[in-house]
Image (cartoon, rainbow, N blue to C red):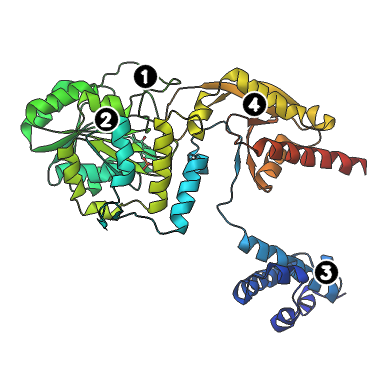
Amino acid sequence: MTSATERLQWLPAVHVCVADPPSAVQRLSAGEMLERAALDAALDQVRSAVLETPDRFASPDNVKTAVAERWVEALEGLLRPALMPVINATGVVVHTNLGRAPLAEEAITAAVAAAGHYTPLEYDLEKGTRGSRYAHAARWVTFLTGAEEALVVNNNAAALLVAVDSLAEGLAVVVSRGELIEIGGGFRVHDIIAKSGARVVEVGATNKTHLEDYERAIETREVGAILKVRRSNFSVSGFVAEVGLADLCRLGERHGVPVIFDQGTGVLEPLPTAPDEPSVNDALADGAAIVCASGDKLLGGPQAGLLCGGSEWIAKVRINPLLRAVRVDKSTLAALEATLRLTAERATDVPVRAMLELDPEALRARAEALIEALTPRTQAQCQVEPHAGRAGGGTLPGVDLPGAAVRVAPKRFSAAALERQLRLGDPPILGRVSDDAVWLDVRTLLPGEMSIVVQRLDEIIGATDSDTRG
Ligand SMILES: *Cc1c(COP(=O)(O)O)cnc(C)c1O
């Protein structure tokens, strides 16, 4: 019997492989560099396989075939985009791990056009002179929020950083202990402020902060700003108290201290699904100097941070050198402009907003239609169930969105195995496993995705049936 080490001699030499690549490698025409990288990976894999399971490689031909197969797979893997579209069947609308908001068609078109062309990003077509990158989307932000002025930066965290730094460099920023939140990904508001030129002064207790706590802090030191942070990703109840934004603004006014409100969600006007969620517009009406909000949460636009507020305060941000470090790119601005215009038109085609407003009956009908489209054998393993969706993205904590899911309980393998097959397919479909079934919430399916889900379910569940028959 040939030993594993002897079988390793059967691995073809690199120059032999390169001289005669498999036809699939040739068809991919990826170029020498990528072909060679994929070949190296394939040879490594087969080398390990021969050592681990030598019996699978009975002849030099077996080894050669394995190298060719791995080579094609490795090259396909290299060429596959890492950020391919995935189907979100979780019912979580602003899914942070899945890139938050999917854009509206018109926002996509605008972003693509800006990306592939020259665009008057910093040019005033009217005057034929240099213009401002901040004028375009900001025009819509002021229109929609009633703010005197607005600026758009890379994201909400950046908006908060520049706002605090612009208003309170070298001074204190007073913030309630109950609002020093972690915004996800391990980032904390406290640390962001610490990185600005301002100093955090915590007031109150975790559960309760009173107006006097703020007042005392303001009277005893030089304060650049009061910060109020929307606890956007959790809610508190019980023995709690916080000071409302309007009261804080009145206090600030008495002492000549501006109030920054980190609103987060990007809700401009009160939402039908969450009427109590503070909106940017209300915050400005309450007297906030600057309100910071995300572009890609409930506004449903691209990743961006909005700064809205009084001219006097936004002017300070405008001249802050940090602004350059957090500036926003042209495609984002184009997508944001389109999203804001659709918002102003009350158009129904901003996906995030449309998904939030879908009612349970419409969703049940959608889930029924999905099951109806399956082959009878797959149908028998599926049923429509009520399922609560979520706004997600650290927004609207505690708000359930009543809806519907297709509950798939596969007969011949585990729910975990089905979830895995759906997740590793092309395109990946992401659902949730619970009580021996995969739950596919139909709220977050985009147009055209339902038929893909139908096809994949039929393939996976049908394939197993024919396997067991054959
Ligand atoms: C989401 C959120 C942030 C961070 O926003 P990004 O756009 O992720 O940078 C900051 N503050 C609050 C209150 C938030 O909800």
Q: Between 32 and 388, which is closer to the camera in this rendering?
A: 32
Secondary structure at numbered mark 4: strand
Image-based side of 155 in relation to 193, left or right:
right
Name above or below for residue 102 compared with residue 326.
Answer: above
Compare marks 2 and 1 and give the one earlier in the sequence.
2
Question: Residue 361: x and y, percent?
Answer: 62, 18
C-alpha span from label 1 to label 4: 27 Å
C-alpha span from label 4 to label 3: 47 Å
Compare marks 4 and 3 and give the one earlier in the sequence.
3
Secondary structure at numbered mark 2: loop
Mark 3 or 1: in front is 1
Q: Residues within 10 Å of mark 4 (few under 14, many from 20)?
A: many
Query: Which mark identifies residue 276?
Result: 1
Residue name at image x 50 percent, y 46 percent = 108
**For mark 2, what is the residue?**
146
User: To which quarter of the image does residue 24 belong?
Assistant: bottom right
Compare marks 1 and 4 and give the one earlier in the sequence.
1
Compare marks 4 and 2 and give the one earlier in the sequence.
2
Q: Amino acid at mark 4?
A: Ala
* Rendered-image quadrant of the C terminus: top right
User: To which quarter of the image does residue 308 belong?
Assistant: top left
Question: Residue 167: x and y, percent?
Answer: 16, 42
User: To which quarter of the image does residue 247 belong?
Assistant: top left
* Rendered-image quadrant of the N terminus: bottom right
**Number of numbered labels in the structure image:** 4
Q: Amino acid at mark 3?
A: Phe
Residue name at image x 34 percent, y 51 percent = 328
Image-based side of 407 in relation to 124, left or right:
right
**For mark 3, what is the residue?**
57
**For mark 4, what is the residue?**
405
Mark 4 or 2: in front is 2
Residue name at image x 7 percent, y 36 percent = 221
